[in-house]
Image (tube, grey):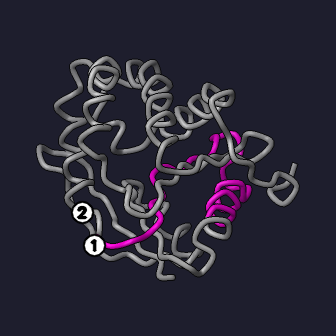
Amino acid sequence: MSPAASPLVQVGSIDRDRVANLLAHAFVDDPAMAFIFPDPVVRARKLPRLFRLLFDTDAAHGVRLMTTGGEAATLWRGPGYASTGYGEMVRSALPMIGAFGTALGRALAVSASISAHLPLGSYWYLHIAGCDPAYQGRGFGGAAIKGGLDRLAAGRLPAYLETATESNVGLYQRYGFTVTADWLVSGGGPRFWSMWRPA
């Protein structure tokens, strides 16, 4: 199936495991996830649970999209909700501790760095974008990003993201994002690129 033949659909709780497993495969070699879970066996085991939690937390204040063939998915947070609020943090504290286990300190370092670099103002936040490795390089990831931008921002609002994968910077640039900063997570963490797409 081509990217054009696999349009985006908004997904709900029934799709939770499918999206979480897709994202777990997509992020298995991600530098941030490798920093949080250095052991690749532990990482492969932990990521589906982590992405199920992120799928849930993005539900209240965002939009979750997937190509109909399940090749790629994007999780967006709506304007004003890029940062995790206090109530959301309290509600997700125990599940997050369970998901990270002994990696919690490294996960908090990554989360704090991401939060410190979030821009002010009203914008759509591309929280997570991933493509199943079996379909990478065939346009599905780009189609999921562009479809989300067309549906959500559509010239009305800017969009923001950060990535720890340098090879993804060019992909996002093709869809109108520009690098606004690059920064390192403390404690030997990965380099991130902040990217902004104007309205």
Q: Circle 1 sits on which residue?
A: 181
Stretch of the chain drawn in magenta: 120-148
Q: Amino acid at mark 2?
A: His
Circles 1 and 2, Cβ within 8 Å, touching? The answer is yes
Say few, some or many: other residues with alpha carbon within 10 Å of mark 2 (under 14 / 14 to 19 / 20 or more).
some
Residue 131 magenta = yes
Q: Amino acid at mark 1?
A: Ala
Of labels 1 and 2, the one closer to you:
2
Q: Position of residue 158 (x, y in %)?
A: 47, 76
What's the residue at 33%, 43% (across, down)? 32
Q: Position of residue 197 (x, y in %)?
A: 47, 77
Q: Position of residue 61 (x, y in %)?
A: 47, 49
Q: Is 156 displayed left or right of 159 in the figure? A: right
What's the residue at 67%, 31% (across, down)? 15
Across the whole image, how many numbered discs are drawn on residues?
2
Between marks 1 and 2, how big is the CA–CA gap?
Answer: 9 Å
Please tell me whether mark 2 sits on a helix, a strand or a loop.
loop
Q: Earlier in the sequence, mark 1 or mark 2?
A: 2
Check the image and report above or below for 196 versus 3. below
Say few, some or many: other residues with alpha carbon within 10 Å of mark 1 (under 14 / 14 to 19 / 20 or more).
few
Closest to the observer, 26 or 114: 114
Q: Circle 2 sits on which residue?
A: 117
What's the residue at 34%, 36% (across, down)? 34
Check the image and report above or below for 124 versus 55. below
Please tell me whether mark 1 sits on a helix, a strand or a loop.
strand
